[in-house]
Amino acid sequence: MSARELDAAAVTDPALRAAYSHCRRLNARHGKTYFLATRLLPVERRPAVHALYGFARWADDIVDDLESTAAPAERATALHRLQHQLDHGLRTGTSPEPVVAALADTARRYDIDPRHFTDFMTSMRQDLDVTQYPTYEDLERYMHGSAAVIGLQMLPVLGTVVPREEAAPHAAALGVAFQLTNFLRDVGEDLDRGRIYLPQELLAAHGVDRALLEWSRATGRRDHRITSALTAAAAVTRDVYRTAAPGLAMLDPVSRPCMRTAFVLYGAILDAVADDGYAVLHRRAVVANRRRAALACDGLIRLAAARLRHRGTGAPTPTAGRSVHASAHASEGTRVPLHRKEPV
């Protein structure tokens, strides 16, 4: 299947094919929900998504891998090395590092604004020494680079039926919604890394602080204040999904089944967290295989219908006469417009 994807994408260089295949394996191994949704994309667009995910995963593992024994200084050095490789790869279009080689080729093919990758690396460096966020606005600045720009990177690959700048805020919001979902699901694991991503003001509004979270994690005991705070965090996340939702109809019709499936699958993670009583400090909530399979089947049906209606829509093109970079520049600094009366 990987060879079929690469053939369809006209990737012929053996080293580059190997680089894309490596990214695909990273996606399949670590991004099960996202990988499932990616299978619903037109075959020629999948390698680009694997490359974008593979690079993000590579950087994230440098700063987050719990199994690594690397000291903070070693992680910082590795991230600096990756930044150098990224800069060189984007400038020259190639790299001896497979993940960067695939990313550079994807960025060239789809003319993705390099500033999205710069912003991403800025947030990755922040993870080396920032362990908590006082307000939602503080967290939002971090998520611009760690999540919103992922949605903006994806837009040229997915294609749009409206000018890119119109779809950009919704794409950015979807990236943030996915990350907020992961933050909620992974509260316990992130605490093991010394980090709390849920804003301190949200936690404090429900009488929760780091000491209480650590106590619950260590003892396995529940506390109604923690449950209340996590419920509020889930409500914030669902608000961001509502901001993102209108963007699905702005995508190329043959890309919509993929992103709709990802949208619903990640929303199902929120449902699983709630159904498990917000016990995320003690175990990871998972979406049942039956539910995942049903959503995948629905996506396949929608994809088949889209292909019948839109035969001949291959690679996406810039819309409404605007260049790719012009649209990307218009979306620079995109933030999720979320303001709740309750501290978030």
Image (spheres, grey):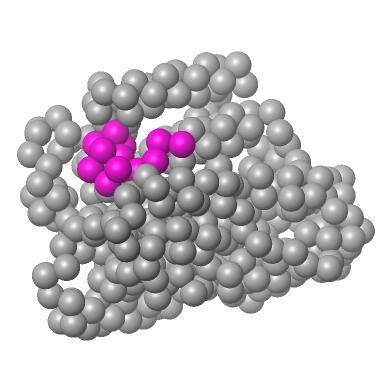
Compared across the picture, whether 184 is left or right of 249 comes to right
Using the rendered image of the protein, determine whether residue 171 is visible from the camera's viewpoint: no
The quarter in which the N terminus is drawn is: bottom left
Residue drawn at x 32%, y 73% is 257
Q: Where's residue 5, x and y in %? A: 15, 53
Q: Residue at x 30, y 58 (%)?
A: 321
Q: Position of residue 62 (x, y in %)?
A: 50, 30
Q: Residue furthest right?
A: 207
Residue 342: image quadrant is: bottom right
Q: Residue furthest front?
A: 321
- The vertical placement of 269 against 77, above or below, is below
Position of 155 with respect to 339 (left or right) is left
**Which image quadrant for residue 230?**
bottom right
Q: Is residue 56 above or below residue 270?
A: above
**Magenta region: which residues?**
103-115
Q: Residue at x 87, y 49 (%)?
A: 209
- Secondary structure mostly taken by the magenta-highlighted segment of the chain: helix
Query: In this rendering, is residue 187 above or below 233?
Result: above
Q: Is residue 77 visible?
A: yes
